[in-house]
Image (cartoon, helix red, strand yellow):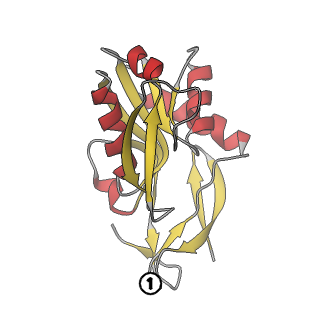
Amino acid sequence: MDYEIEIAGLKRQLPLCPLSENLFIGAFVIFGDVELTVACARELNKIAPEYDVLITAESKGIPLVYEMARQAGRNNYLIARKSAKLYMKNIFSTTVRSITTAKEQTLCLDGDDAASIRGKRVLIVDDVISTGESLIALEHLIREAGGIVAGRMAVLAEGPAKNRTDIQFLQWLPLFNKDGKPIPA
């Protein structure tokens, strides 16, 4: 089963994947789709609040924040990594439970990156916002580093996330029942 969605003027087919016997999600994978990445970055930049730096959680948001930064003429963006890397020092970290991996993950920010956002407006960008757990984790890292959350953005708001007033997004992605029919949010 697939679900057709239009995002930033482009149509894509999303395969439906089971989270449980009766609940399915549309798999939105921006990796490798340059046309969609460029279009989504353009549309997100149009509605973005004022910010000093972009941040995303590893990994699907990476091409999106890169392209948003490139189009906006900015020379940097930050990535909260899923694990500490050897080059990282004075690490800021927090845990998050992701809906797509169904397990706890750690997000890490290098101490130099953390220092670079102290007192700065940081815009959180993700591919999909569903439960909001990744947002909470990123907000924690930003605040712990002394940064200011400028806003929260995503390409898609999944399920009931479309009703949130604290995020900006391009399109709603419903959740689905076992027959592939959208569940109203």
Where is residue 141 drawn, in percent x and y? 35, 33
133 and 141: which is toward the camera: 141
Q: Is residue 22 left or right of residue 135?
A: right
Q: At 35% across and 43% down in the image, what residue appears?
A: 137
* Tag 1: amino acid: Asn
173 and 143: which is toward the camera: 143
Where is residue 135 drawn, in percent x and y? 36, 44
Q: Quadrant of the N terminus?
A: bottom right
Q: Is residue 49 visible?
A: no
Which quadrant of the figure has residue 123? top left
Say few, some or many: other residues with alpha carbon within 10 Å of mark 1 (under 14 / 14 to 19 / 20 or more): few
Q: At 42% across and 24% down in the image, what residue appears?
A: 90
Q: Is residue 153 visible?
A: yes
Q: Is residue 32 left or right of residue 4?
A: right
Which quadrant of the figure has residue 87? top right
Q: Quadrant of the C terminus?
A: bottom left
Q: From what the image shows, is residue 157 above or below residue 79?
A: below
Local secondary structure at mark 1: loop
Q: From what the image shows, is residue 19 above or below residue 99?
A: below
Where is residue 134 drawn, in percent x and y? 39, 47
Q: Is residue 73 left or right of residue 52?
A: right
Residue that mark 1 sits on: 22
User: Tag count in the figure?
Assistant: 1
Q: At 38% across and 24% down in the image, what residue appears?
A: 122
Q: From what the image shows, is residue 109 above or below residue 175?
A: above
Where is residue 159 drawn, in percent x and y? 39, 63
